[in-house]
Amino acid sequence: MALGDYIAIERQVGPYEFEACSVSTGTTFLARVDEDKQELFSHREWIDRHPSACPFLRPSGDRVICCIHETSPPQCKAYRCVVLRIRSSDGKPAGCVTGTLALHTDDPALREAWKEVEEAMGRDPGLDEVEICTILGRRGFICD
């Protein structure tokens, strides 16, 4: 949530488009609110209560999510937030995947299944979370 100190909205250039600045690097970028998050982004109550949070974060259920995931700057893409929580077939926590697509687990079966994900990422560096969950699902894991 503290990335607000590093991302500033310079000006709005369209209904859901903003010229933003990565304060730490001085680099400007076009931030476009993801189409599936536009309604969520329109709700300002949470961000008004958390003025130091990144201006593009919004609560969704029990998580806080990025509304510009597709156009977020490099420091956000490298940020180690949890993007997937993984459970075993019986619903017990098995591990998680951070924003850098790194697996964190003590579960040997999940580590073994993750090898297939790594192979797929080698073939397709743009592999997304849905595809990762599909691979892990074939091995009996559930992604949240």
Image (cartoon, rainbow, N blue to C red):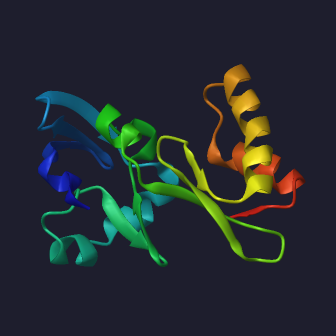
Residue beneath the point at 39% across and 72% down: 59
Quarter of the figure with the C terminus: bottom right
Q: Is residue 88 above or below residue 106?
A: below
What percent of the width, then of the height, locates residue 10? 11, 42
Q: Quadrant of residue 78?
A: top left
In the displayed structure, does residue 3 sit left or right of residue 125? Answer: left
In the displayed structure, does residue 62 sit left or right of residue 32? Answer: right
Q: Exactly how many numbered labels are in the figure? A: 0
What percent of the width, then of the height, locates residue 84? 59, 58
Quarter of the figure with the N terminus: bottom left
Q: Is residue 52 above or below residue 113?
A: below
Q: Is residue 67 above or below residue 29?
A: below
What percent of the width, then of the height, locates residue 31? 30, 40
User: Visible in this render: residue 47?
Assistant: yes
What percent of the width, then of the height, locates residue 85? 60, 63
Of 19 and 135, which appears nearest the observer?
Answer: 135
In the displayed structure, does residue 26 sit left or right of residue 105? Answer: left
Q: Quadrant of residue 87?
A: bottom right
Q: Is residue 107 above or below residue 116?
A: below
Of 106 and 72, which appears nearest the observer?
Answer: 106
User: Visible in this render: residue 144?
Assistant: no
Of 119 and 104, which appears nearest the observer?
Answer: 104
Q: Quadrant of residue 25?
A: top left
Residue beneath the point at 79% across and 45% down: 112
In the displayed structure, does residue 123 sit left or right of residue 99? Answer: right
Residue beneath the point at 18% across and 72% down: 50
Residue beneath the point at 89% across and 52% down: 138
